[in-house]
Image (spheres, grey):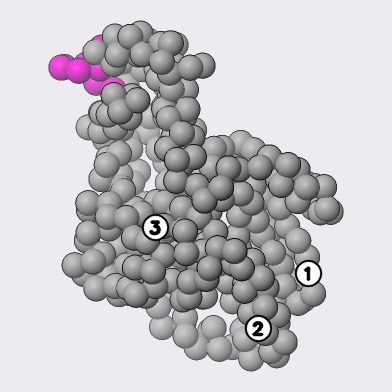
Amino acid sequence: MCLTNNKADIKATLKLFTGTSTFMEALTTNGTNIQTSVTGVTANKRRFIDERRDQPFDKRLRFSVRQTESAYRYRDIVVRKQDGFTHILLSTKSSENNSLNPEVMKEVQSALSTAAADDSKVVLLSAVGSVFCCGLDFIYFIRRLTDDRKRESTKMADAIRNFVNTFIQFKKPIIVAVNGPAIGLGASILPLCDVIWANEKAWFQTPYTTFGQSPDGCSSLTFPRIMGLASANEMLFSGRKLTAQEACAKGLVSQVFWPGTFTQEVMVRIKELVACNSVVLEESKGLVRSIMKVDLEQANDRECEVLKKIWGSAQGMDSMLKYLQRKIDEF
């Protein structure tokens, strides 16, 4: 549904949510219009990303990639089993711009579980198109709050906890090729991986406070350790956007490659890694990661408990609603 054709109706609906009305009361009394609002924000989010893409997204590329793969059991990811490594590509159909809802997260977890048990030496995580990952599927979450706010908040927090723990506990090296924007959880999981290569046109942002959310993906622990407290606070509190070069300078990214040769550079380096002994790779990661594993698991638990608390409160939902209002007013 087009946002511009329904803007007046959307604004009239949002007026119901001000003053003494709680977010939940508004949703339950006028579910149809909030769905219209959500649809409008979805359209805006798509436009927002499109304006920042290196090149127009070619749907034929997504089709071509899926046609050449054998793992058709996945809907939102593509899995390539290649010589010495598993390549997992985000290619979401149930969400916009490779954003993460429980279905997408479960598929990534399943692919990682398979790679952990097979002869893959490393995992390469990337994405189809020109967007890496837009973080949590905010629209998916909002649409389910009309049912039971606390239950849905708990379900989403638990999904994030399990997803993040899968990365924390994965024993083989995870290499990430960030081809475009990495936002929210799409950026915060990067320190849980082992080597991060970025396209020079990629950018990184965790604008949690903008839409009334606290940090996730262990970023409350990893960001200060990687880039220092001041820079971490800028990202986590004010949503500062980092270019690929800035992210590399701060330690969030390992190397930055030219867009025109990005894929080739990644594949050359992956082949160098898979030429190494698998036991050496796994044991080396274990030595580097073992000292932080418990801290990461505890940070993940703390963050998810806070998210559950915020999302389950009327104030937290009101913050989300204000975010929706701002996005509608921008377009």
First of labels 3, 1 by sequence position = 1
Question: Principal SS element in the magenta part?
Answer: loop
Few, some or many residues within 10 Å of mark 1 (<14, 14–19, 20+): few
Q: Residue furthest left?
A: 19
Please determine whether, in this image, residue 146 is positioned above or below residue 307: above
Residue 185 shows in the view:
no
| Residue lying at 22% horizontally and 51% vertically, measured from the top left | 238
User: Where does label 1 land, which residue?
Assistant: 82
Amino acid type at circle 3 is Phe
User: Where does label 3 land, which residue?
Assistant: 204
Magenta residues?
16-23
Residue 25, horizontal then vertical, whole percent? 30, 16
| Real-space Cα separation, disc 3 to disc 2, in angstroms | 26 Å
Magenta highlight on residue 20 = yes
In the image, which disc is placed on residue 273?
2
Q: Quadrant of residue 88?
A: bottom right
